């Protein structure tokens, strides 16, 4: 059994901030695993926003939350994560993106650079100092490869006086293995 996988690494990287966060965003609800992680590990008073463009994804997420009695902490939003600023009006402490397609869903329906980048840019504007954004990218499919290359360029050029960016990858795996990026806002 593989102990370290991109999702568990992303969760570990944001764990300390999640514990004390007031506003959290799951930009890609998917099957609800990240949303559930945020809901289970954040303050009882925390507010969580979970975005997805697929009703199936939000249904799966809602079911997971209901099983644990955590649905009241989360606002499920059937809209593109690029529109985050229409819904989240306060500063964000933690955000997580798990790019790609819905596991078990239509692989033709994926996140794309056209909406992912505006969503990340908006999230960085909303991010409080000390806040973090975790992004898991999947360069193993065509759309994911484009996102991956754009992310490398974009994140490498964020101003070092405002952000610290790190990267986690499985270096003995194929070059198409998932990659996790962590962005911390250190100054406005």
Image (spheres, rainbow, N blue to C red):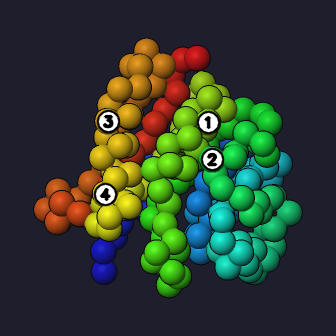
- Nearest to the observer: residue 88 or residue 68: 88
Q: Mark 4 touching mark 2, by CB under 8 A?
A: no
Q: Earlier in the sequence, mark 4 or mark 2?
A: 2
Q: Nearer the viewer, residue 161 or 143?
A: 143
Q: Quadrant of the C terminus?
A: top right
Can residue 37 be seen from the camera position used here? no
Residue at left offset 52%, top offset 54%: 97
- 1 or 4: tag closer to the N-terminus: 1
The residue where tag 3 is placed is: 153
Q: Identify residue for label 4.
A: 145
Q: Secondary structure at mark 4?
A: helix
Residue named by callout 1:
122
Helix, strand or loop at label 1? It is: helix
Above or below residue 169? Residue 141 is: below
Q: Are marks 1 and 2 in contact (CB under 8 Å)?
A: yes
Q: Earlier in the sequence, mark 1 or mark 3?
A: 1
The 10 Å Cα crowd at callout 2, few under 14, some 14 to 19, many 20 or more, is some
Distance of mark 3 from mark 2, alpha carbons? 19 Å
Mark 3, Cα crowd under 10 Å, few <14 / some 14-19 / many 20+, is few
Nearest the eye: 49 or 146:
146
Q: Which mark is residue 82?
A: 2
Q: Which callout, 1 or 2, points at the residue further toward the start of the chain?
A: 2
Q: Are marks 3 and 4 in contact (CB under 8 Å)?
A: no
């Amino acid at each position: 059994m593989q102990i370290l996988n991109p999702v568990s690494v992303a969760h570990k990287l944001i764990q300390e901030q999640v514990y004390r966060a007031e506003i959290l965003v799951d930009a890609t609800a998917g099957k609800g695993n990240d949303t559930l992680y945020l809901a289970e590990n954040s303050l009882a008073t925390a507010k969580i926003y979970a975005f997805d463009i697929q009703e199936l994804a939000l249904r799966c997420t809602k079911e997971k939350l209901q099983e644990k009695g955590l649905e009241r902490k989360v606002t499920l939003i059937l809209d593109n994560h690029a529109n985050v600023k229409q819904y989240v009006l306060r500063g964000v402490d933690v955000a997580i993106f798990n790019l790609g397609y819905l596991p078990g869903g239509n692989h033709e329906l994926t996140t794309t650079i056209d909406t992912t980048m505006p969503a990340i840019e908006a999230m960085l504007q909303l991010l409080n100092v000390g806040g973090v954004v975790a992004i898991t990218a999947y360069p193993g499919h065509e759309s994911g490869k484009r996102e991956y290359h754009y992310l490398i360029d974009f994140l490498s050029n964020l101003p070092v006086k405002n952000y610290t960016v790190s990267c986690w990858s499985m270096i003995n795996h194929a070059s198409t293995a998932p990659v996790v990026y962590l962005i911390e806002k250190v100054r406005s």
